[in-house]
Image (cartoon, helix red, strand yellow):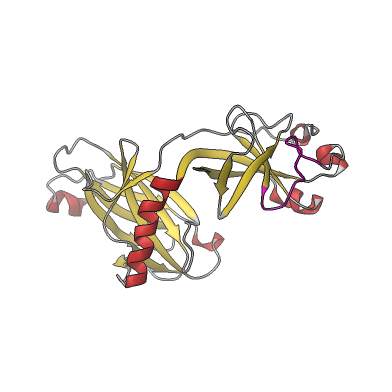
């Protein structure tokens, strides 16, 4: 229905798929560990399986802003970095992890970080959440366990398991119903009138019409297609050409709302 706008791009789109089931578990984790340090450039910690020290832990970090229920950033690391303190405490030093983070790209100053280990396509909480403020540096301090904090943690653990499935990283772009983007069409492939913060175009072999997905904090509905929207690519509808252009090309994690 729409013109192939991707041919106008001067660089190739590369993307990868990480299809995993986001079943967050509150059961006993296969690993022990925690976040031990957060500073202006990185987040560090350790994770190990005391029953199998050769089992290298995959760690996923979620960064939150105050009052936000959805993470603003996901970070991934392997717990296979040598640390002398672990060699002393655990008698095996090869279980540390460290991942770079650019705090300057986030608005605000205060953040909460939660760590999980990923095992058999399940997520297990690793240690306690920690707080970080821009400009602070040093040993990570656990976030206060207020009633609200405990409720929020429960939501983060249980909600994805029952309502969402992670589809992986998609390349997203923006379009509108102008002549350049859609050939002047005013209706989507489904026959519906496109709406901002609602309509997306997708590859129907991956996401059939009517599928609902969450990208960031917004839940969209698949109502459209595009000649260049193939594979793990999603085109997000905007109510103006300027907004569509400003979206550019981005790599974003996509969740199927079930």
Rendering coords of residue 95 (x, y %) = 24, 45
Residue at point 45%, 50% (across, down): 74
| Quadrant for the N terminus in the image | top right
* Residue at x 56% of width, y 60% of height: 105
Residues 70 and 194: in front is 194
- Residue appearing at x 73%, y 52% in the figure: 246
Magenta-span inclusion, residue 191: yes
Residue at 79% of width from left, 34% of height from top?
Answer: 2
* 183 up-or-down from 153: above or below: above
**203 or 82, nearer to the observer:** 203
User: Which residues fall within the magenta stretch?
Assistant: 187-198
Q: Answer with left or right where residue 7 lies relative to residue 127.
A: right
Up the image or down, 13 lies above or below 88; here it is: above
Taking the image as shown, residue 126 lies to the left or right of residue 73, namely left
Taken as a whole, is the magenta stretch helix, strand or loop?
loop
Q: Position of residue 28 (x, y in %)?
A: 21, 48
């Amino acid at each position: 229905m729409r013109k192939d706008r991707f041919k106008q791009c001067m660089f190739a789109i590369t993307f990868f798929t990480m299809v995993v089931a986001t079943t967050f578990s509150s059961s006993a984790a296969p690993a022990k560990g925690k976040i031990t340090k957060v500073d202006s450039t990185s987040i560090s910690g350790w994770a190990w399986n005391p029953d199998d020290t050769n089992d290298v832990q995959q760690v996923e970090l979620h960064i939150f802003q105050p009052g936000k229920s959805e993470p603003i950033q996901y970070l991934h690391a392997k717990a296979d970095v040598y640390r002398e303190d672990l060699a002393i405490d655990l008698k095996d030093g090869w279980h540390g992890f460290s991942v770079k983070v650019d705090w300057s790209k986030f608005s605000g100053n205060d953040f909460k970080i939660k760590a999980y280990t990923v095992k058999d396509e399940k997520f297990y909480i690793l240690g306690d959440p920690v707080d970080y403020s821009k400009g602070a540096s040093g040993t990570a301090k656990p976030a206060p366990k207020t009633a609200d904090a405990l409720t929020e943690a429960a939501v983060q653990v249980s909600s994805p398991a029952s309502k969402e499935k992670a589809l992986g990283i998609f390349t997203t772009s923006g379009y509108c119903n102008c002549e350049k983007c859609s050939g002047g069409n005013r209706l989507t492939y489904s026959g519906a009138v496109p709406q901002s913060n609602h309509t997306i175009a997708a590859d129907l072999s991956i996401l059939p019409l009517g599928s609902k997905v969450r990208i960031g904090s917004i839940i969209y509905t698949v109502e459209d297609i595009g000649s260049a929207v193939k594979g793990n690519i999603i085109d997000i509808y905007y109510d103006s050409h300027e907004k569509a252009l400003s979206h550019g090309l981005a790599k974003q994690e996509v969740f199927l709302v079930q």
